[in-house]
Image: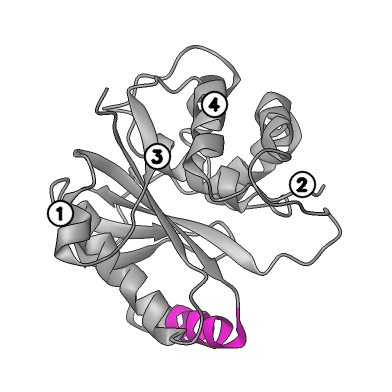
Amino acid sequence: MSLLPLESNPDVLNKFLQKLGVPEKWSLVDVFGLDADSLAWVPKPVLSVILLFPISETYQTFAETQANEIKEAGQTVTPDLYYVKQMVSNACGTVALIHSIANNMQQIEIAEGPFKKLLDESKNMTPAERGELLQKSAAAIMDAHRELESEGQTTANPNDEVNFHFVAFVQKDGHLYELDGRKEFAINHGGSTPETLLEDAAKVCRGYMEREADNHNFTIMALTASQN
């Protein structure tokens, strides 16, 4: 199965969230800079940070090295973390949104529907089992993705190679986690709190950008409480 990629556009992605049953109180906003002044403009509380970044040889090499180091040293991962493997091509935007919502169910009251049913059914599954369930039985979620594929300012072909990827950052049980459904596991980036999630995630995002100093094709969004 292959989908068209979703555009990194808060207007488009917020429509997707609402189709999944997320209250309008919670929405994505652009993060226009990683300096303290820019981060201060982002409404609080922030529940997740989503990064869209270019896939390159530099990134692939770094990711492989990082995975090997974690395998050798080990890491702490809270059992309450919701992590799902991406089984569907070009679904990284959908997976990033699922990671953002599923790990903040205490704050976000999702309406009854296919998405809430998926989260309830997959609560005690492995990441791979969750990915299989999303692929096989979450038709309504994939349909919502397809409805919004054509929205935004860019056009795409499902057969084209996609050189950009979404990942989500969430705070869970005192740690900052990077959730990328294409990786072998979630990545623990160290201590964090609900109040410092944005700043802590910004540091990791800054590392992505510094490794690609000649590439400016990065987009950062935050899932936050609406100011309306």
SS for dot 2: loop
Q: Earlier in the sequence, mark 3 or mark 2?
A: 2
Circle number at residue 196 = 1
Of the residues shown, which amino acid type is indicated by label 1?
A: Thr
Marks 3 and 2 sit apart, C-alpha to C-alpha, by 22 Å
Contact (Cβ within 8 Å) of mark 4 with mark 2: no
Of the residues shown, which amino acid type is indicated by label 4?
A: Glu
Of the residues shown, which amino acid type is indicated by label 2?
A: Leu
Q: Is residue 79 shown left or right of residue 167?
A: left
Circle number at residue 121 = 4
- Which residue, given by chain and number where applicable, does mark 3 sit on? 28
Q: Residue furthest top?
A: 112
Q: Position of residue 94 (x, y in %)?
A: 58, 43
Q: Quadrant of residue 58?
A: bottom right
- The residue segment tinted magenta is 56-70
Residue pictured at 61% horizontal, 87% vertical: 57
Marks 4 and 1 sit apart, C-alpha to C-alpha, by 31 Å
Contact (Cβ within 8 Å) of mark 3 with mark 2: no
Marks 1 and 2 sit apart, C-alpha to C-alpha, by 34 Å
Residue pictured at 63% horizontal, 52% vertical: 86
Marks 1 and 3 sit apart, C-alpha to C-alpha, by 18 Å
